[in-house]
Image (cartoon, rainbow, N blue to C red):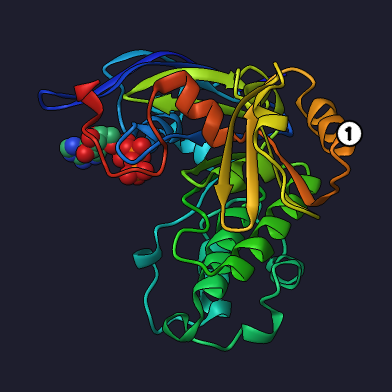
Amino acid sequence: MSVIEVRNLRKSYRDHVAVHDVSFAVEEGEIFGIIGPNGAGKTTTVECVEGLRAPDGGTIEVLGRHPRRDGQELRQLIGVQLQESALPEKATVRESLELYSSFYRKPVDWRPLAEDLGLSGKLSSRYGKLSGGQKQRLSIALSLVGGPKIAFLDELTTGLDPQARRDTWEVIEGVRRRGVTIVLVTHFMEEAERLCDRIALINGGRVAAVDSPSGLIANVQAEQRIRFRTSAPIDDRFLTDLPEVRSVEHQGSQLLVSGHGELLLAVTAALSAARVSPLDLRVEQASLEDAFVALTGRRIEENPVAAGSN
Ligand SMILES: Nc1ncnc2c1ncn2[C@@H]1O[C@H](COP(=O)(O)OP(=O)(O)OP(=O)(O)O)[C@@H](O)[C@H]1O
């Protein structure tokens, strides 16, 4: 069952079109990623879905309701992660949780929520004294305190170190296990690949594709790459003569062999015929980043580009 349906969404800021034409549906219980480079229109899209902005065109339904006409009712049913600056530095974690609970008609008990998010030991700490990861976990807790059916998390792990980022991912998986549908806005490919059931790739205010991470990757006609060292020197021609091999590159002590078809089999057979063993062999898989490049012709983590310019 779809809990969000967006059809042909369009939104401009004065004469700048931020979202040209965006359509997607989010199914109940899934983690749905909205990914794309800076300025692609992700936040604008999500803010229209949340009812914070009025679209110029298209239709949006959230839990069968209209985000703006039924805004008051919907605010009780959705949770929105706050931007970092939204909380007073001096408020304690407990005060923040109590304050946000008071906004909802049927809040959940915030204590087990704080426990699940690893905040129990920090209830008396002031917001300003929390680490980046703790602030992030508190903002997730606050988005869940109303017991929402859908949580919107925007740039969840920006600014966190890799360990804090991984810890946050576990938290999100826990949230999903509570049955909450999650809309996750990110430009971190690894995060999207790890967490999302399905992803809308957004570029220049348009949807480039909607699919599961593996579906998006499978559609890329990316080359295969095999990386290894050899137990003894080998003439490149043993490899370049193979029909499956397109190129052989030397990178330090490693060989990077690119090609297609049964590349791994062909390369290992050729090495074996030359009585050379491959060491530390790694097959490099196409990534979500490769899928994005194949679909849009650009990398996702490059500099901001005006959404209306492409
Ligand atoms: N309030 C605003 N007024 C004018 N232009 C805006 C406003 N908000 C966003 N934009 C512009 O609209 C485009 C889309 O912005 P949006 O924030 O939706 O993109 P995004 O994909 O979320 O980017 P980021 O990853 O950087 O947050 C950008 O070109 C941005 O500069």
Q: Quadrant of residue 170?
A: bottom right
Apparent side of residue 271 relative to residue 308 in the rendered image (left or right): right
Apparent side of residue 36 relative to residue 221 in the rendered image (left or right): left
Instruction: Using the image as rendered, state which of residue 259 and residue 181 is in the foreground.
Output: 259
Instruction: Give the residue drawn at x 67%, y 50%.
Output: 147
Instruction: Using the image as rendered, state which of residue 184 and residue 93 is in the foreground.
Output: 184
Q: Report helix, strand or loop for mark 1.
A: helix
Q: Quadrant of the C terminus?
A: top left
Instruction: Using the image as rendered, state which of residue 249 and residue 26 is in the foreground.
Output: 249
Residue 251, how many percent across, how many down?
56, 51
Q: Ligand 1 falls in which quarter?
A: top left
In this rendering, is residue 253 above or below 29?
below
Q: Quadrant of residue 203?
A: top left
Apparent side of residue 26 relative to residue 90 in the rendered image (left or right): right
Instruction: Give the residue drawn at x 53%, y 66%.
Output: 136
| Residue picked out by circle 1 | 273
In this rendering, is residue 186 above or below 112?
above
Q: Is mark 1 within 8 Å of ligand 1?
A: no
Q: Quadrant of residue 307?
A: top left
* Outermost left residue: 15
Q: What kind of residue is marked 1?
A: Ala
Residue 33 shows in the view? no
Residue 276, how many percent across, how many down?
84, 46
In this rendering, is residue 243 above or below 123?
above
Instruction: Using the image as rendered, state which of residue 77 and residue 298 is in the foreground.
Output: 298
Q: Quadrant of the N terminus?
A: top right
Label 1 packing within 10 angstroms: few (<14), some (14-19), many (20+): few
Instruction: Give the residue drawn at x 84%, y 38%.
Output: 274
Residue 154, how many percent across, how many down?
47, 47
In this rendering, is residue 261 above or below 151?
above
Instruction: Give the residue drawn at x 69%, y 68%.
Output: 117
Apparent side of residue 56 relative to residue 145 in the rendered image (left or right): left
